[in-house]
Amino acid sequence: MYSYLSPLRRADLIAHDQRLIDLVKEADELIAPHNKALSAFIGRELKRLQSAVKDRIRYTKLKPEDIDTLKRNHHRILTDDWQSINQAINTRSLSASILKLIKRTLQDLKTAPKPAPKPAPKPVMSLSAYIQHFTDSLEAAYAKLMAKRANAYADGVDPIDDIKAGLLASQRAVTQGIDLSGIEETQAKGREFFSHFSNLRAILTACLQIDLYTLSVDSVFTPEVLNHGVIQGILAFTAKLRPHFKTRNLILMYDRLAEELYSSISRHTCGFADALPLPDIAPLSDDVIAITPKAPRIAPDSKPLPFDLTQPIQDILSTLGADVVTTDTEVLSAPDPSTLTPVDDQTLKTIACYLTGSASTPYLFNGDLIIHSPQTNQYLKVLPTIREDGYADYVFTAYNIKALKDRINTLQGVLLADPRYRSSLSPCITHIPQGDPVARQKAIKDMQELADILLAQVNDLYKYDADDYDGDTDYVVTKRTIRQIVQTPYYKPIYLSAHRLAAYVYYPKEYSTYIAAKPTDPITGKPLVYHVHHKDGCRSNNCPKNLEIVSKQTNDTSRSTSKPVIYQGIHYDTIKDFAVANGFSHDALRQAISRAKRQGKTVITHKGLNIHLSNDGSVSINN
């Protein structure tokens, strides 16, 4: 009877049978409120989906240069405004209100007065002059140290360094089966040689230049030179002075430094037994310094810095008061423990706990983020989202369950006052399962759906503005309560770069030194920018062997200009070589090819050129 296609609703039957007329009337009365609710639901869903599509379309019309301007000037934007803008950029969804905010912000950035130029810095000693001053001061202190040692020998007292050197020599003679008398003679020659500062000045100057100019030590010294004990001893000595080098501190305890230099060389050469012969090293010229790659030196005992990408995530968790996290996962069979690399980051450990509902451990397994839940003994692989540029992101959603429950309870309390909704209210879900992320995610989704249904019903009940009910105090108060609960956030998306996480976990010292520490050029003051490079070109392959940390210039060149090009029978090693030789814009050509690859195209036309993209990465071009 509810269906309009029912044969019992045929006009010729109803017209002659009062019973059917009454039944149809009763059925229509029963189904009417349900049809009304269904129509309202469909209308709301269509409106929501239309809004989501419009937000996505609106974002695509945002100019890349405007996004770049916002990111570069985020420190000049109000914190709340930037959070809203940054979330829109990350989610690639732009509401009308945020678009107005972006336009207003861009206009403010254009019209805002430029900050007053900073006063010119006070002249400081040049690096070359500082090296000269440092070595001269250290030489004077070193001469005093050698004189002190000579006096000790004259009094028949062996300095403590010689006693330590003798112990090292004895241990080496026992382990390697070497005649101790021969080692003692070699040590004596080494001590005599290094009692003269002039014999180590050239090597010391070269090592100072490496740390003062932030030069790549691998580009200055060969592996054989780096393995020499004297080089290791001097580099260990200069590494401890890097904080003083940054400020070019002139007031140092040079007497103490002279002792540390001598002791460091002795310690790294087994008491001077391996000190001679010295490698032939000269200080670097200005021209060599200018062309040597910049790279902070990693000291063997340096501790990695905290992961720089998780502090903003921790701020989100704390501000939201999150206690549950969801994401897409799949269960893996138990992997070999030796293939798991622990993720030593407290924020990610917290996310792992919020994801499973109990203390869990995050690992990387061949570059993938794995969560081990001891409660269920399951290994959960977090499924990444592949971005348009090919990189992988881990996307989590953090929830404040208490805020979500308060929203549901408040909305139900409003609806209880109306008999139309009282009988349809469902009890609030209060239990979030522990251990099983899938069950936890379903429970939260059910709570979200219930909250959305209740909000739609409340909006239907209070669809008129409070201005129309100036005399109804309860209506105004309730309307204000609804607005407050809607404006209270209970969830927020979180994004984490998969390749940056893998680089930090697998190469923590290199990541800390080159990326997290944000090194700068000591001369220009400009940042030294380094990227995580994928050797095979696949940006979602984050296994340790596929990753390396290189300069931004090297990474850009490797990923955008390394494809061979054939044009009119001539072979070009790179796209850049072709562009330069034939008068085309390299950047425009590179962007066109990258865009085509993302879209899965194999043939494109650019500036009158027919460009064919091969599976092996090579490019063929013809007119």
Image (tube, rainbow, N blue to C red):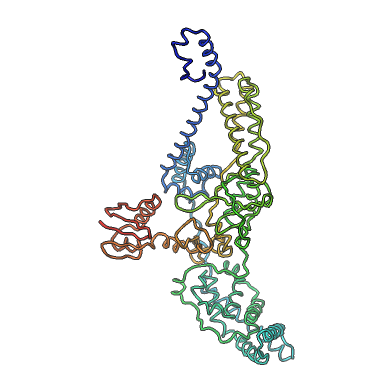
Q: Nearer the viewer, residue 589 or 7?
A: 7
The quarter of the picture where residue 511 lies is bottom right
Examine the rendering and report whether any part of residue 175 can be seen: yes
Position of residue 194 relative to residue 226, above or below, is below
Image quadrant occupied by the C terminus: bottom left
Residue 385 image position (x, y, % from top left):
51, 49
- Find the residue positioned furthest to the right: 156
Residue 235 image position (x, y, % from top left):
58, 75
Residue 572 image position (x, y, % from top left):
32, 65
The quarter of the picture where residue 276 lies is bottom right
Position of residue 597 relative to residue 303, above or below, is above
Examine the rendering and report whether any part of residue 477 can be seen: no
Q: Does 603 sit left or right of 505 as displayed? A: left
Q: Does 160 sit left or right of 488 as displayed? A: right
Q: Does 387 sit left or right of 243 as displayed? A: left
Q: Nearer the viewer, residue 137 or 591?
A: 591
Position of residue 504 relative to residue 242, above or below, is above
Query: What residue is shown at x 57% (from left), y 62% (from top)?
Result: 506
Q: Nearer the viewer, residue 74 or 353?
A: 353
Residue 186 image position (x, y, % from top left):
63, 90
The quarter of the picture where residue 562 lies is bottom left
